Amino acid sequence: MNPIRVLIADDHDTVRQGLRLLIEAQPDMRVVGEASDGTSAIARTTALHPDVVVMDVTMPRQNGLAATREVHTAAPDIAVVALTRHGDEAYVQEMLNAGASAYVLKQSDSSELIRAIRNVAEGKLYLDSSVAAGVTTAYLRKHSPATVNVPTISERETEVLRRIAWGLSNKEIAAALDLSVKTVEVHKANAMRKLGLRGRIDIVRYAVLQGWLQEL
């Protein structure tokens, strides 16, 4: 099989060198070029037409978001792996909206990047395990229904989480759904485990992204 041809775009020389060593150590990958800013990333991508671009989000001249959008528009068959220190879900969704196929944190284990490159080369979407829980399942299904394995929660678990987001207590939820308080607690725990939510704040954020707070 032909190796996966990778272009590295990052404004730090030492980072590019490290990424090159990591990627070229893989038997199925080859680095075909580098870029130090967003503008050159677009030019190098157009000239070299790699299979995958590893794109830093924060770069001079043009940032990774703008560069990703241009690359995706000009050559949608080229997959972009966003590489950044920003784990906020807003960054994730902006990069996915721009056309990125993967989102990986620089502080994560190097294996995350390697898995991301292999996944996007196969036409799949990949999210760093540290940020995946913060992106809504609805968003993932909308963008890649056949290639992403996303957690699902039951209708009852959804009803419980919605009411928690609205500020109802377990006792109030139990009364509203005709359940015992213990059953409500079980549904809550199961849903949070499946979605990777850690507390009420995460539940509220998830509810906002799902549009649950428009009406109960």
Image (spheres, helix red, strand yellow):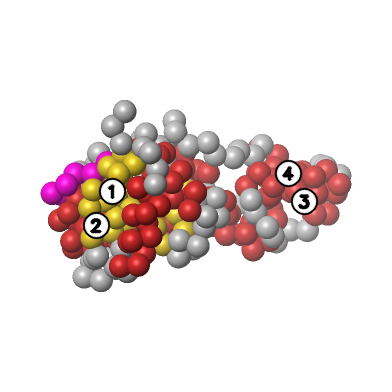
**For the magenta stretch, what is the residue range?**
46-51
Q: CA distance from mark 2 to mark 1?
A: 8 Å
In this figure, which residue is indicated by the disc labeled 4? 190
Q: Is residue 90 visible?
A: no
- Of pointers 4 and 2, the one earlier in the residue sequence: 2
Q: Which disc, if any, is residue 173?
A: 3
**Can residue 97 be found in the magenta stretch?**
no
In this figure, which residue is indicated by the disc labeled 1? 31
Residue sitting nearer the eye, 112 or 159 = 112
Q: Which disc, if any, is residue 34?
A: 2
For the residue carrying disc 4, how many other residues have a C-alpha within 10 Å: few (<14), some (14-19), or many (20+)?
Answer: some
Secondary element at tag 3:
helix
Amino acid at circle 1: Val
Q: Is residue 196 visible?
A: yes
Q: CA distance from mark 1 to mark 4?
A: 43 Å
For the residue carrying disc 3, how many other residues have a C-alpha within 10 Å: few (<14), some (14-19), or many (20+)?
Answer: many
Secondary element at tag 1:
strand
Position of residue 212 in the picture relative to residue 199 (left or right): left
Q: CA distance from mark 4 to mark 3?
A: 16 Å
Q: Are marks 2 and 1 in contact (CB under 8 Å)?
A: yes
Image point (70%, 56%), residue name:
164
For the residue carrying disc 1, how many other residues have a C-alpha within 10 Å: few (<14), some (14-19), or many (20+)?
Answer: many
Amino acid at circle 2: Glu
Q: CA distance from mark 1 to mark 3?
A: 55 Å
